[in-house]
């Protein structure tokens, strides 16, 4: 059998009699099974050649690296009717996956705090791990491939693995992990596993798999280096700071964020192709209510998210005309803000509740110079305050989606149910003879 861990191939040998080796022989076969060719294993050509003077040829089943390890799959080969048949003429091979039942620790996780009717598909949920009373039995010392290489998540079947990204890991405090939930309802259950030696983190932790194709960019707003921040999507729209530690990384809603004070982060290169609809969301904490305080400024369309617009103390978006939604939110306090930029109108949500009226909107393409914290020229209209978890989606996120983001990120312990850690004990029968 083949194995997904380590990408260990499996082999099938095809034989012929030793009395008929004067010519090469092409042996044709069909391919079936539950494994997906080209995605989970290298595609097979459908024939194998036994060379001259040889009696055996080998068909190799080579597993491929996947973002999230699939469950154990099968590959079925059958010699076609016109081929020389042996005994047997069919074979089934397994591509064996990680067996999470062998992981030493397991935690059930639920989401009773999600009480909306809509089922959210591919929702990136935030999980927070730490050693304290309401994480019963959780200890960083139980990770056996440190720091977190043995961390895994599955759906409620304990087999189907889920994509995840570790935003930050702190064995002395809180660790923040994003897990892509296939379908989020109030009844959804998933499982976290850890406690396995000599394993590696799956590719999903770094390849953007948590953030599906509708995310244009996701900036967790922590430092990648002293001068850069990282986009967690596959698009790689990373940002460069004005200077080292300018803006400054600070404690924020989810781990770390950035504090702006006559500083900026250059996002030049940000583009959405031909897309003109967006959902823009962030956590923001402003320290002033002046005019022309730009959280995000994109040169073309233009698209300008203003903490303070041309009218002092008004929050809005500039798209060639001014869309003011109301008074700038309370200062020196974290707020979750989202804008639905549709083809004809734009709607703002403040802490998951619609803020002001929906306004007419002229849909724009993105391009040119893009900047966090200042005008795109990077010389004026600075935003004074802090930003965390800034996202741009190329779809209109529903009100329930926006509400779930706000509650999950801002009130995690009320949204997520962390079960007691269970030690998974291998079960079997031991026979003793004397």
Image (tube, rainbow, N blue to C red):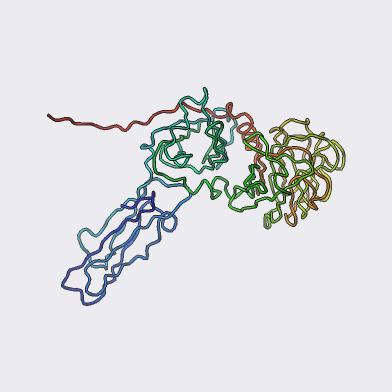
Residue 178 picture quarter: top right
Instruction: Name the side, left or right, on which 81 lies relative to 101.
Output: left
Of residues 410 and 371, which is closer to you in this image? 371
- Residue 336, placed above or below residue 214: above
Residue 381 picture quarter: top right
Q: Residue at x 19, y 31 (%)?
A: 431
* Residue 317 horizontal/vertical position (percent): 79, 44
Q: Residue furthest top?
A: 133
* Residue 405 horizontal/vertical position (percent): 63, 36
Instruction: Name the side, left or right, on which 131 lies relative to 237.
Output: left
* Residue 237 horizontal/vertical position (percent): 65, 52
- Residue 50, placed above or below residue 245: below
Q: Residue at x 82, y 33 (%)?
A: 327
Of residues 49 and 264, which is closer to you in this image? 264
Q: Residue furthest bottom?
A: 22
* Residue 181 horizontal/vertical position (percent): 52, 39
- Residue 290, placed above or below residue 203: above
Q: Residue furthest right?
A: 311
Instruction: Name the side, left or right, on which 196 lies relative to 308.
Output: left
Q: Residue at x 31, y 62 (%)?
A: 59
Residue 330 picture quarter: top right
Q: Residue furthest front?
A: 244
Label count reads 0
- Residue 208, placed above or below residue 188: below
Tell me the quadrant of the picture where the C terminus can be found: top left
């Amino acid at each position: 059998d083949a194995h997904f861990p380590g990408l260990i191939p499996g082999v099938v040998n095809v034989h012929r009699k030793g009395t008929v080796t004067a010519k090469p022989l092409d042996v044709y076969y069909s391919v079936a099974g539950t494994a997906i060719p080209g995605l989970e294993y290298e595609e097979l050509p459908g024939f194998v050649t036994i060379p001259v003077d040889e009696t055996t040829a080998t068909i190799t089943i080579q597993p491929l690296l996947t973002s999230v390890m699939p469950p154990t799959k099968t590959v079925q080969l059958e010699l076609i009717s016109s081929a020389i048949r042996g005994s047997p003429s069919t074979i089934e091979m397994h591509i064996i996956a990680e067996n999470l039942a062998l992981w030493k620790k397991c935690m059930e996780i639920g989401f009773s705090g999600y009480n909306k009717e809509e089922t959210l598909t591919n929702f990136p949920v935030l999980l927070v791990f730490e050693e304290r009373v309401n994480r019963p039995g959780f200890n960083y010392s139980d990770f056996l491939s440190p720091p977190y290489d043995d961390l895994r998540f599955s759906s409620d079947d304990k087999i189907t693995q889920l994509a995840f990204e570790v935003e930050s890991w702190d064995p002395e405090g809180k660790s923040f992990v994003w897990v892509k939930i296939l379908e989020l309802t109030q009844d959804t259950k998933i499982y976290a596993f850890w406690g396995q030696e000599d394993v590696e983190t799956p590719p999903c932790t770094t390849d953007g798999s948590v953030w599906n194709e509708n995310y244009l960019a996701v900036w967790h707003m922590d430092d990648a280096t002293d001068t850069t921040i990282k986009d967690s999507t596959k698009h790689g729209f990373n940002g460069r700071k004005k200077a080292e530690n300018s803006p400054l990384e600070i404690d924020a809603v989810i781990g770390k964020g950035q504090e702006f004070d006559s500083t900026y982060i250059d996002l030049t290169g940000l583009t959405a192709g031909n897309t003109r609809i967006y959902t823009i969301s962030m956590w923001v904490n402003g320290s002033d209510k002046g005019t022309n305080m730009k959280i995000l400024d994109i040169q073309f369309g233009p698209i300008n998210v203003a903490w303070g617009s041309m009218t002092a103390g008004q929050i809005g978006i500039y798209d060639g005309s001014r869309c003011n939604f109301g008074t700038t939110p309370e200062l020196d306090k974290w707020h979750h803000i989202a804008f639905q930029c549709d083809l004809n109108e734009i709607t703002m949500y403040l802490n998951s509740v619609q803020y002001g009226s929906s306004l007419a909107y002229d849909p724009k393409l993105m391009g040119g110079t893009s900047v966090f914290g200042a005008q795109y020229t990077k010389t004026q209209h600075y935003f004074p305050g802090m930003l965390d978890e800034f996202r741009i989606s190329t779809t209109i996120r529903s009100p329930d989606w926006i509400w779930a983001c706000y509650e999950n990120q801002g009130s995690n312990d009320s949204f997520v149910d962390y079960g007691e850690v269970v030690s998974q004990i291998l079960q079997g029968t031991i026979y003793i003879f004397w």
